[in-house]
Image (cartoon, grey):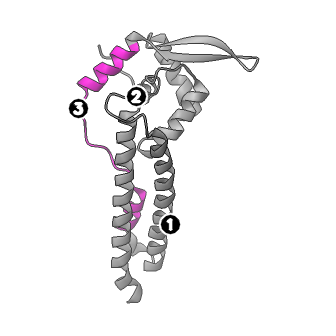
């Protein structure tokens, strides 16, 4: 039952599995709150392109509704969409994630600039990690109470925990690199 969908299509199907109908805008909001920590949050144009594709294939159903006096279209995953998502989940190898880490790329060629500049870049990264950690900790906290086995937010809470651990490891590695650069900066 291959649907030949891009990963973004499956991500949108997944965002629609929490039992509610969402508009394209609401899907974008949910993506921004969740996907941004570990996947690229799709642009609005991408979301609407995928929603058209998913609707054309019968994977989501579109319905007009009134919201504050204006007509909007909301989307819900269909049984066919559930089956396609499950087939993708069950039949796709885990795969190794492609790491496009600009900080590591810049650190790799750190010799091309002054050690102070490389250290500044790492310090900025540590600050960005601190902000991302705070944001994700807020998301994680919002999942408490619905994150026990069998509850709907169990798996999103596991992703949030993984992300928090990842950010902690990234922070440790950045601090280790900064400590190591102290020798270069004093030379």
Identify the residue at image location x=49%, y=73%: 120
Upstream in the sequence, badge 2 or badge 3?
3
Return the residue at label 3.
93
Where on the picture, by quarter, is residue 95?
Answer: top left
- Foreground tag (2 vs 1): 2
Q: Label 2, label 3: how many angstroms apart (C-alpha)?
A: 24 Å
Q: Quadrant of the C terminus?
A: bottom left
Compared to residue 47, the image places residue 82 above or below, namely above
Magenta segment's dominant SS is helix
Where on the picture, by quarter, is residue 45?
Answer: top right
Return the residue at label 2.
152
Q: Label 3, label 1: how many angstroms apart (C-alpha)?
A: 35 Å
Upstream in the sequence, badge 2 or badge 1?
1
**Disc 3 on helix, strand or loop?**
loop
Task: Answer left or right for 136 relative to 98.
Answer: right
**Disc 1 on helix, strand or loop?**
helix
Q: Position of residue 137 (x, y in %)?
A: 46, 50
Upstream in the sequence, badge 3 or badge 1?
3
Residue 95 or residue 131, whichever sits in front:
131
Identify the residue at image location x=58%, y=25%: 24
Task: Answer left or right for 159 relative to 126.
Answer: left
Query: What are the residue bounds of the magenta stretch?
Result: 81-108
Could you tell me if the residues under marks 2 and 3 are in contact, i.e. CB atoms within 8 Å? no
Residue 18 or residue 3, whichever sits in front:
18
Task: Give the residue furthest to the right.
Answer: 69
Q: Position of residue 50 (x, y in %)?
A: 49, 23
Could you tell me if the residues under marks 3 and 1 are in contact, i.e. CB atoms within 8 Å? no
């Amino acid at each position: 039952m291959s649907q030949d969908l891009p990963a973004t299509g499956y991500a949108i199907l997944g965002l629609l599995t929490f039992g509610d109908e969402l508009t394209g805008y609401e899907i974008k909001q949910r993506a921004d709150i969740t996907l941004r920590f570990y996947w690229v949050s799709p642009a609005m144009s991408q979301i609407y392109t995928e929603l058209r594709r998913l609707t054309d294939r019968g994977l989501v159903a579109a319905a007009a509704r009134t919201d504050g006096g204006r007509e909007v279209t909301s989307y819900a995953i269909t049984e066919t969409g559930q089956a396609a998502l499950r087939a993708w989940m069950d039949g796709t190898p885990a795969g190794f994630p492609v790491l496009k880490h600009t900080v590591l790329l810049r650190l790799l060629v750190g010799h091309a600039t002054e050690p102070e500049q490389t250290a500044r870049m790492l310090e900025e990264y540590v600050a960005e990690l601190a902000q991302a950690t705070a944001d994700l900790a807020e998301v994680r906290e919002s999942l408490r109470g619905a994150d026990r086995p069998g509850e709907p937010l169990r798996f999103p809470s596991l992703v949030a925990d993984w992300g928090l651990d990842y950010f902690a490891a990234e922070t440790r590695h950045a601090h280790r690199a900064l400590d190591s650069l102290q020798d270069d900066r004093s030379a």
